[in-house]
């Protein structure tokens, strides 16, 4: 008997494809050897194109479970890009309206993607960056509590919890428990906090490194220079063994090498975390490093890096 379409196709929603991303070993960099290995957690394989799919789904599900998000409410939050796109995609899949507060100077790729998903964009000042968007979103949530459900990605424990429950366990199993270093960029800090917590519970010797830009005026989209920014409520520096301060130009150079040596077209923060990993290799005799690469480089084509 022929199988029905339902039997052949057991995915009921695109949100079911979030997570379980591949781990890819780097091979082309001269710093690598059989004892010094770097693996990439390839988060651009998520259906929305970034690791933010994980946190957005976790926060939306938490809102539904707690009844703070109901069918008559609109999902609204601040985001400079990837989380906004994740909200828009998941909102479209689950039937929720979505509005995003984002700096007016976000690139054209992100604007067009949000519009394609049907999300409404509310622009904040281009001169105030992500902090300006945060402040504007908080005002909207306060003034229109009956209209909006604001997940508040910077202060919502469901953000790091997504990585404690999914990203961390995936990395642990994919490395056969052999991981020695975990490196992640810090934006909201959800990935770094949740994943490092899980991995440290498995093995306290795993070195956890959070990557931030080395200057408040930087070109590493998606990363936050914590000393000059509104500090996320979910951020706890004590959960990390080290902060690596990434230089923008050096991170861009690593982005270009990842394309030429590995065929990996990654975003700004991807270059920064691999830069941190390469410098870490210079200080150790043996390592199995896992770098989280949040997104692909196609979201940055208009930014000038690839001109």
Image: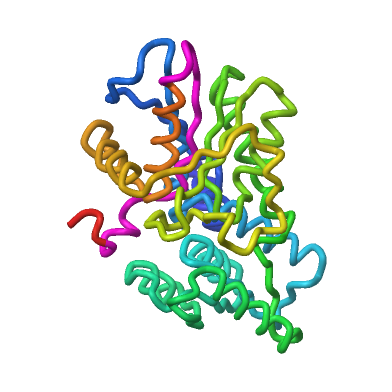
Instruction: Left or right? Give the position of 141 relative to 77.
Output: right
Residue 67 image-quadrant placement: bottom right
What is the x, y in percent for residue 304? 24, 60
Report whether residue 191 is seen: yes
Picture residue at 73% right of the left edge, 83% below the top: 142
Residue 305 versus residue 76 in the image, above or below: above
Residue 83 versus residue 182 in the image, above or below: below
Picture residue at 28% right of the left edge, 32% below the top: 262
Count of numbered tags: 0
Residue 115 versus residue 146 in the image, above or below: above
Q: Is residue 68 magenta?
A: no
Picture residue at 51% right of the left edge, 83% below the top: 122
Q: Which residues are magenta?
A: 282-303
What is the x, y in percent for residue 199? 67, 30
> Front-most of 202 and 12?
202
> Front-most of 244 and 290?
244
> Front-most of 74 and 192?
192
User: In the current view of this chain or complex, which residue is farthest to the right?
Assistant: 66
Instruction: Left or right? Give the position of 130 relative to 62.
Output: left
Picture residue at 71% right of the left edge, 23% below the top: 204
Report whether residue 12 is seen: no
User: In the current view of this chain or complex, which residue is farthest to the bottom?
Assistant: 143
Q: Quadrant of the C terminus?
A: bottom left
What is the x, y in percent for residue 118? 47, 78
What is the x, y in percent for residue 194? 67, 43
Residue 306 image-quadrant placement: bottom left
């Amino acid at each position: 008997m022929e199988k029905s379409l339902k039997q052949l196709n057991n995915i009921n929603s695109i949100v079911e494809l979030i997570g379980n991303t591949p781990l890819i070993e780097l091979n082309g960099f001269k710093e690598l050897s059989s004892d010094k290995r770097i693996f990439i957690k390839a988060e651009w394989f998520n259906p929305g194109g970034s690791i933010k799919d994980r946190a957005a789904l976790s926060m939306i599900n938490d809102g539904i479970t707690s009844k703070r998000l109901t069918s008559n409410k609109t999902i609204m939050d601040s985001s400079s890009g990837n989380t906004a796109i994740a909200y828009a995609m998941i909102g479209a899949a689950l039937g929720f309206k979505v509005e995003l507060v984002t700096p007016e100077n976000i690139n054209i790729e992100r604007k067009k993607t949000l519009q394609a998903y049907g999300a409404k964009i509310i622009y904040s000042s281009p001169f105030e960056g992500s902090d300006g968007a945060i402040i504007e979103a908080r005002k909207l949530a306060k003034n229109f509590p009956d209209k909006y459900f604001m997940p508040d990605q910077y202060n919502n424990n469901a953000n790091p919890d997504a990585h404690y429950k999914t990203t961390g366990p995936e990395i642990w199993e994919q490395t056969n428990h052999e991981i020695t270093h975990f490196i992640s960029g810090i934006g909201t800090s959800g990935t770094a906090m949740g994943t490092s917590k899980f991995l440290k519970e498995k093995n306290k010797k795993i070195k956890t490194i959070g990557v931030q830009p080395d200057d408040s005026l930087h070109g590493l989209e998606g990363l936050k220079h914590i000393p000059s920014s509104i500090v996320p409520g979910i951020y706890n520096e004590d959960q990390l063994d080290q902060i690596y301060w990434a230089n923008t130009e050096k991170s861009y150079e690593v982005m270009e090498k990842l394309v030429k040596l590995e065929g990996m077209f990654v975003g700004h923060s991807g270059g920064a975390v691999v830069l941190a990993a390469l410098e870490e290799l210079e200080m150790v005799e043996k390592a199995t490093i896992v770098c989280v690469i949040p997104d692909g480089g196609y979201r940055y084509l208009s930014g000038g890096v690839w001109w």
